[in-house]
Amino acid sequence: MKQFMKILGVCALPLTLSAPQMAVADGATDANFSVSIRGIPAGSLTVKGKESGGAYSASGVLQSGGLVGLVAKVKYTATASGRVKGNRFSPARYDEKADTGKRKSDSSMTYSGGVPTVSDYEPSANGVKPSTQKGTVDPMTALYAAFRDVNKDEVCKLDVKMFDGKRASQVKLASPRAEKGMIKCDGEYRRLAGFSAEDMAEKARFPFNLYYAKTDDGRYRVEKVVTQTLFGNAVMKRK
């Protein structure tokens, strides 16, 4: 179970971050992905969101499936809302529900002046204090920021610091270049703080590649993400 959670986390959050069926109408996004590890179906990710009048709201579901789903039933749902200006997001609230098949849990964060407050925060030796995380975004906001359709001059331009209530990390995209009719980006997900010494020694930086395709309206959307994980190549593909 712990290994499967790491796999989906490395695939989804870094891209935070990855590849859906996006439809944008009146500021709305509807994205659906399949996740596979070394060619084996592992799960799915759905991201939905909308923007209006400088405000945004987003929701997502990450769950096991395929052959992996037969032995590990995992499901996470999350929602986020706040303000947006360009590609700068200021979350106001984040809610998460987790069901590992053995345990269910709920967690939430609210923001004041850009500083998160965690509903169930418990100080620990490795834990990051929420008061030090001003200007960070929650995982759901980071996913939505990565999945939105963008103009050409915004392709591969993403740099967000993320706080999930316990750990701090960072996602970056850079180096846009043409490849097989799409635009390929170099990306990196980096663990910053709050992770165990074991996790940091295991791997602190996870490179990945993200691919954009041009839409009928002249904008660009993510079609595929390929990343190296501790368990082999992981691919997220638009359904």
Image (cartoon, rainbow, N blue to C red):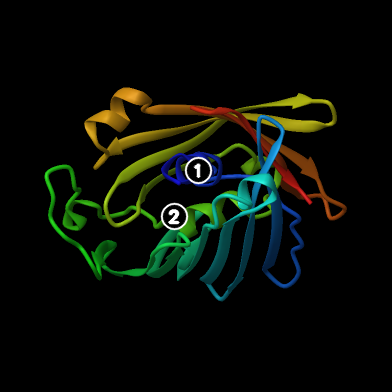
216 with respect to 233 (left or right): right
| Residue drawn 66% across the image and 41% down it | 153
Judged from the image, the secondary structure of the residue bearing numbered disc 1 is helix
Give the percent coordinates (x, y) of residue 74. 52, 57
Label 1 Cα crowd, 10 Å radius (few <14 / some 14-19 / many 20+): some
For marks 2 and 1, the one nearer the N-term is 1
| Residue drawn 36% across the image and 28% down it | 204
Closer to us: 7 or 225: 7
Asked if one can make out residue 104 in the rendered structure from this viewpoint, the answer is yes
Q: CA distance from mark 2 to mark 1?
A: 18 Å
Going by the numbered disc 2, the residue's amino acid type is Pro
Closer to us: 172 or 36: 36
- Position of residue 119 relative to residue 159, above or below, is below
Label placed on residue 4: 1
- Position of residue 187 relative to residue 130, above or below, is above
141 with respect to 134 (left or right): right
Give the percent coordinates (x, y) of residue 110. 31, 71
Q: Which residue is mark 2?
A: 139
